[in-house]
Image: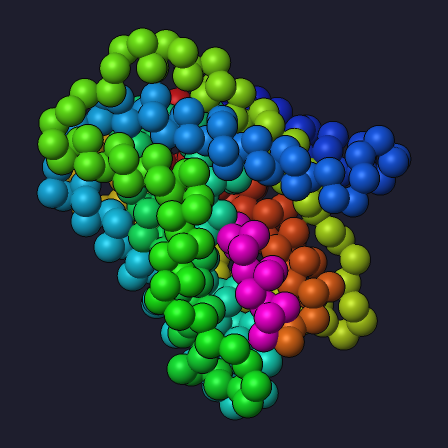
């Protein structure tokens, strides 16, 4: 327990460090974009390669890709169902923010601090399905469930283009193909990329701190709290069922169960704005989900016996 609390505290300190450095003017309001690009194009892909190197890919593990898709669809539909009597904008906001997991910049760096290659690798597979929805799949769903005159519909081609322009997604697919074909990751590649992979947690948490936005438009707190509460109730049910029933090793069950408590995906902000949602409310909701997720994921890490 001491190791878990110490590591989680170090993550929190990095987040707060980034937040206060931005408030003090050391970083500008858009400087997080540079660090985010570093995470998504170097340190996270490096971590994925290093962890996939020792992961034995099986058909059961591939089912985690479907789980990532399925959990996004389930939570999006739950959010839409609860907001179905509201306006098109309210339904879109619920669809886009009930669903989506911030795996790359938050859950993956967190898991790196506690679990081995099998757990992190399994989370990468889960993130493939999650990424399909976060990069446009859920937004496309809003055109069907929350239509609004004049809203431009995103096409399958646009979703595919956005997916394949992501370095992380491309690396995930490459590792999956190599695993299916039983092609080993070269040892030299693992040795060269290990330092970058080790830096992922530090840089990602600092980036999260720079992205935090705690200003909320008046009268919107209830809407944000309802989404955070709903997401985490679903996460608790899903984590309990997966940990107790899924036919995987302990480490993989721990990794996926913890991943269910990941905060809202950052991509939600851009898609919510496209749907006419207040960017201030979206930014606050995403930031609040980060501050809530860290202690919940830490508590679950202890309860599941991670050491």
Res 266 visible: yes
Query: Which residue occupies 65% across, 63% down?
Result: 282
Is residue 204 positioned above or below 222 on the image? above
- The percent coordinates of residue 31 (x first, y second) are 73, 38
Query: Looking at the figure, which quarter contains the C terminus?
Result: top left
Q: Nearer the viewer, residue 8 or 87?
A: 87
Q: Residue at x 56, y 52 (%)?
A: 266
Q: Is residue 102 above or below residue 94?
A: above
Residue 279 horizontal side relative to residue 97, left or right: right
Q: Where does the image place residue 123, in percent across and percent down from the top left?
A: 34, 39
**180 left or right of 199?**
left
In which quadrant of the rendered view does residue 208 lie? Answer: top right
The residue located at (12%, 27%) in the rendering is 182
Does residue 73 appear left or right of residue 180 in this picture? right
Residue visible at 14% across and 43% down in the picture: 60
Q: Is residue 130 left or right of residue 13?
A: left
Residue 274 included in the magenta stretch of the image: yes
- Between 185 and 225, the one lying in front of the other is 185
What is the span of residues highlighted in magenta in the rendered image? Answer: 258-275
Q: Is residue 252 visible?
A: no
Give the quarter of the image for residue 294.
top right
């Amino acid at each position: 327990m001491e190791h878990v609390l110490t590591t989680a505290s170090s993550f929190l300190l990095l987040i707060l460090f980034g937040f206060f450095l931005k408030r003090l003017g050391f970083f500008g309001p858009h400087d997080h974009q540079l660090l985010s690009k570093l995470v998504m194009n170097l340190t996270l892909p490096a971590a994925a390669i290093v962890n996939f190197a020792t992961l034995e890919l099986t058909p059961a593990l591939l089912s985690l890709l479907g789980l990532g898709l399925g959990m996004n669809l389930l939570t999006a539909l739950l959010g839409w169902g609860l907001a179905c009597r509201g306006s098109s904008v309210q339904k879109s906001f619920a669809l886009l923010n009930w669903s989506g997991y911030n795996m790359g910049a938050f859950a993956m760096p967190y898991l790196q601090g506690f679990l081995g290659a099998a757990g992190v690798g399994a989370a990468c597979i889960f993130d493939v399905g999650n990424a399909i929805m976060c990069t446009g799949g859920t937004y496309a769903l809003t055109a069907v469930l929350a239509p609004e005159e004049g809203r431009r519909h995103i096409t399958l081609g646009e979703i595919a283009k956005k997916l394949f322009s992501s370095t992380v997604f491309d690396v995930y697919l490459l590792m999956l193909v190599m695993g299916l074909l039983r092609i080993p990751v070269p040892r030299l590649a693992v040795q060269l990329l290990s330092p970058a992979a080790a830096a992922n947690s530090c840089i990602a948490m600092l980036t999260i701190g720079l992205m935090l936005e705690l200003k909320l438009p008046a009268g919107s707190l209830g809407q944000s709290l309802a989404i955070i509460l709903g997401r985490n109730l679903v996460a608790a049910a899903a984590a309990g069922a997966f940990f107790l029933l899924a036919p995987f090793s302990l480490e993989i069950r721990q990794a996926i169960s913890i991943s269910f408590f990941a905060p809202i995906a950052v991509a939600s902000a851009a898609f919510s704005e496209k749907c006419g949602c207040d960017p201030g409310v979206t930014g606050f909701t995403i930031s609040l989900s980060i501050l809530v997720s860290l202690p919940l994921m830490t508590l679950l890490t202890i309860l599941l016996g991670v050491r």
